[in-house]
Amino acid sequence: MPEISPRPLAELTTLRTGGTPDRMVEAQTTGEVVAALRDVWATGEPWLVVGGGSNLLIGDEPFDGTVVLVRTTGIERLESPCDGFARLRVQAGHEWDDLVAFAVREGLGGISAMSGIPGTVGAAPVQNVGAYGQEIVQTLVEVDLIDEATGEVSTVPASELGLGFRTSVLKHHYGSVPARSAVILSVTLDLPVIGAGATTVPGDQLRAALGLAPDDAVTLQWIRETVLATRARKGMVLDADDPDTYSAGSFFQNAIVTAPFARTLPDECPRWPMAPDLDPVVVIPLEEYTGLVAPPTSSEPDVKVSAAWLIEHSGLRKGFKLPRSRAGLSTKHALALTNRGGASAGELAQLARFIQQRVQAEFGLILQPEPVLIGVEL
């Protein structure tokens, strides 16, 4: 097993926190990942898989277990059974933005709006990454993964991953355990073949973000460059010289609330109705049919509201810091908690709790953290 000298996890996470683990394995191939995980699971000791480290807040104490660094890379282009699409199988350790850049060069759409998102491909389905109206659920076909319960490798279709808004059955939500404890080994996507020329852009949210009218035609490369520039202005593109990027991106999820609750919020709070669930098909056996069918029930769809707006309008502006703390809100984006230099995980957690309390006091809801928290309590 490719065991290496343990490094502080603060060197491997974008929030720059985390102690040194007992053991560390750097896996360069799928076989090494599988072998390392089976070995660790057999011992029953704590374990942690790290890819890009961009969605982790890890505590300051040494990690009492084994950290597996997934460093597998590679993109394989396959023939898609769907006309007008190309199928890509990508190794879990491949950097997500490198995949987006590859797709754009090849004239493949579906993920260009997710340019600049840090992290690795294997982490993308875990929280159903997305930006500007595009989510990986729209293009994901299947994943290869290894289950902790059995140690077996299997191919799992996207439909079995429970993909929702920044969630899946694989995600370790704060205060709970994943519905399925498993590690992704590779990801398979079907992407539409767009080409290098200009074309219209589907999706109201993406067009609005890009400042486009429905009939405007642009190239995939233009979309990528525009999204990267937009994210950079918000401090959401990693830059070693910019402390605003020492973050986990959006620390809190945009809140999903009921339509009646959304109406209690100020009209100025940005909100987006979630797609309503379609009424299920009702099948009545012929021998049981009486000529009457119960009328369908309908309900208002839930509403997604802007966590950044809630934070700023609870009185916490960009750049806010608690006294004597080295953690602070980004000076560019109120949704990013940043390590301003040498901040501990405890300082970041203290700031996160303060934000939650202010938003709850002002608007009556508790923001939920988006990163995975290891050895840290809010």
Image (spheres, rainbow, N blue to C red):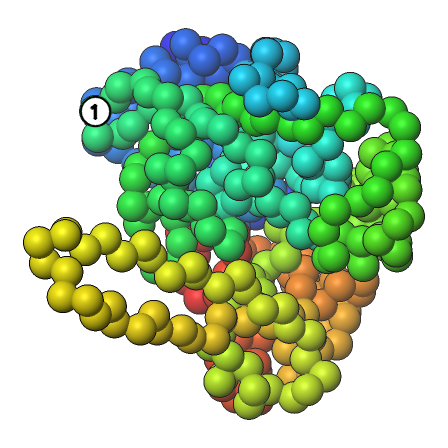
Residue projecting furthest to the left: 287
Left/right placement of residue 109 relative to residue 293 reads right
Residue at 63 percent across and 68 percent down: it is: 272
Q: Residue at x 58, y 75 (%)?
A: 355
In the visual, does 270 lie left or right of 6? right
The answer to which quarter of the image holds residue 292 is bottom left
Q: Residue 96, percent across and down?
A: 65, 31
Q: Quadrant of the N terminus?
A: top left
Is residue 202 visible to the viewer in this orientation of the structure? yes
The relative height of residue 325 versus residue 134 in the rendered view (above or below) is: below
Q: Nearer the viewer, residue 342 or 242?
A: 242
Density class for disc 1 (Cα within 10 Å; few <14, some 14-19, many ≥20) is few
Compared with 205, 92 (above or below) is above
The residue type indicated by label 1 comes to Thr
Front-lying residue, 259 or 175? 259
Q: Residue at x 76, y 52 (%)?
A: 206
- Pointer 1: what residue? 150
Task: Between residue 13 and residue 7, name the one nearer to us.
Answer: 13
Q: Is residue 95 in view?
A: no
| Mark 1 residue element | loop
211 lies above or below 112: below
Residue 373 lies, in percent from the top left, at 45, 52
Q: Which quadrant of the figure contains the C terminus?
A: bottom left
